[in-house]
Image (cartoon, rainbow, N blue to C red):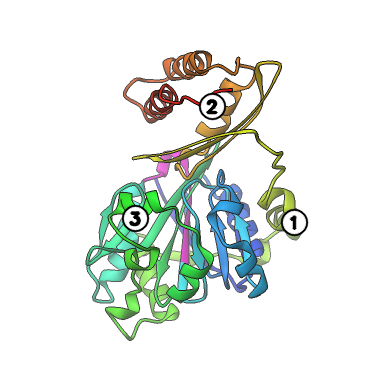
């Protein structure tokens, strides 16, 4: 049961410092504590843990305009941040984690500013049928976070210039462009500012948990722990990773997200495999990669391995469905060589 609320705002627009502080706060969260962390980035595309940066954004456009590419810990899709966007993170232990309660904070906060909002699909919050907030989730051991965006006055021309959204994803949402799918809260309430929204968030946070939030004591931040995290998030290896040249590629879109498989095979067996995906379950990706590594590069053998992987999971659970969905699509592939 939550008996302590803490509240902290970032003092920088640097995405790597902000992501470092987010992970640090998660691992510092007390057993019965919930921390609300509010932060903003300047001109940044933030990709999900298992996404391909080369496909998710127009990197050259972004770099030439002085922008940043960052990779977060959580799954989900790529998002564009500028200072017209407010990011929030709830940092909490597993036993107290409640997505519905955490989302209620967001919905109440915007309602205080005269805006009606509803939850939609896997991870979105909408107003008047258009998305203004996307959410993603992460857990390691007992430590969890739930974070997301709130679009106040984002430059949607820049959003379209820097994000590369696949046409099949747009079709699945019933829209023709990423701009037509999203909206800024300032269009509904022209008086909204970051400061007003922060105050409303803090008020809603205290209402939902029926506790008074205490400012996080920033003097307790351990620079020796934060610096290596910032170094990690800003490193080439973390953002881009090691991407060998792959000979075979299979791409699909499902109701749970995309699956973009890149496979190399030597002497008839899979030697390298990377699965890029915007699915929210970050652990599914390395598990499936491990399950397919070493398997014969043969459609029947790959499908058998996928079926075996699915078989170790609950048939009513998401990992079973995801593996079976990929297996079903692989059965239709004709170009195995």
- Determine whether 60 is above or below 24 in the image: below
Q: Is there any visible trace of residue 37 in the rendered image? A: no
- Distance Cα–Cα, label 2 vs label 3: 26 Å
User: Circle 3 — which element?
Assistant: strand
Mark 1 crowd level (few <14, some 14–19, many ≥20, 10 Å Cα): some
State left or right for residue 63 relative to residue 208: right
Q: Nearer the viewer, mark 2 or mark 3?
A: 2
Say which residue label 2 marks: 288
- Determine whether 39 is above or below 189 in the image: above
Q: Earlier in the sequence, mark 2 or mark 1?
A: 1
- Is 3 contained in the magenta span? no
Residue sitting at x 47%, y 45% = 278
User: Circle 2 — which element?
Assistant: helix
Residue sitting at x 50%, y 73% = 158
Residues rendered magenta in the picture: 87-98
Say which residue label 1 marks: 231
Q: Earlier in the sequence, mark 2 or mark 3?
A: 3
- Distance Cα–Cα, label 3 vs label 1: 30 Å
Say which residue label 3 marks: 124
- Is 92 contained in the magenta span? yes
Q: Is there any visible trace of residue 20 in the rendered image? A: yes
User: Circle 1 — which element?
Assistant: helix
- Distance Cα–Cα, label 2 vs label 1: 29 Å
Callouts 2 and 3 close, C-beta under 8 Å: no
Taking depth in this image into account, of 77 and 298 the one nearest to the observer is 298
State left or right for residue 84 relative to residue 21: left
Residue 207 occupies quadrant: bottom left
Q: Position of residue 210 (x, y in %)?
A: 32, 59
State left or right for residue 98 relative to residue 240: left
């Amino acid at each position: 049961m939550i008996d302590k609320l803490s509240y902290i705002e970032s003092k920088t627009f640097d995405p790597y410092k902000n992501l470092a502080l987010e992970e640090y706060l998660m691992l510092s969260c007390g057993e019965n504590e919930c921390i609300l962390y509010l932060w903003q980035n300047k001109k940044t595309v933030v990709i999900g843990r298992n996404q391909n940066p080369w496909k998710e954004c127009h990197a050259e456009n972004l770099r030439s305009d002085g922008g940043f590419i960052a990779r977060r810990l959580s799954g989900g899709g790529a998002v564009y941040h500028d200072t017209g966007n407010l990011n929030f993170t709830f940092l909490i232990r597993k036993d107290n984690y409640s997505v519905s309660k955490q989302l209620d904070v967001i919905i109440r906060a915007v309602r205080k500013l005269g805006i009606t909002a509803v939850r939609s699909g896997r991870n979105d919050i909408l107003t008047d049928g258009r998305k203004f907030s996307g959410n993603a989730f992460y857990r390691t051991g007992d430590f969890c976070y739930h974070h997301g965006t709130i679009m106040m006055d984002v430059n949607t021309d820049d959003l379209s210039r820097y994000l590369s959204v696949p046409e099949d994803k747009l079709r699945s949402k019933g829209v023709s462009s990423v701009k037509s799918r999203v909206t800024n809260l300032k269009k509904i309430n022209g008086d909204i500012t970051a400061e007003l929204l922060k105050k409303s968030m803090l008020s809603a946070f205290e209402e939902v948990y029926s506790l008074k939030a205490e400012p996080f004591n920033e003097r307790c931040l351990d620079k020796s722990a934060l610096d290596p995290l910032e170094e990690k998030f800003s490193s080439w290896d973390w953002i881009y990773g090691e991407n060998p040249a792959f000979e075979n590629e299979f791409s699909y879109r499902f109701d749970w997200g995309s699956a973009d498989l890149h496979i190399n095979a030597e002497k008839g067996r899979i030697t390298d495999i990377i699965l890029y995906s915007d699915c929210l379950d970050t652990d599914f990706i390395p598990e499936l990669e491990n399950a397919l590594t070493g398997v014969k590069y043969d459609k029947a053998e790959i499908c058998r391995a996928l079926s075996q992987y699915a078989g170790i999971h609950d048939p009513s659970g998401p990992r079973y469905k995801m593996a079976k969905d990929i297996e079903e699509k692989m059965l239709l592939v004709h170009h195995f060589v």
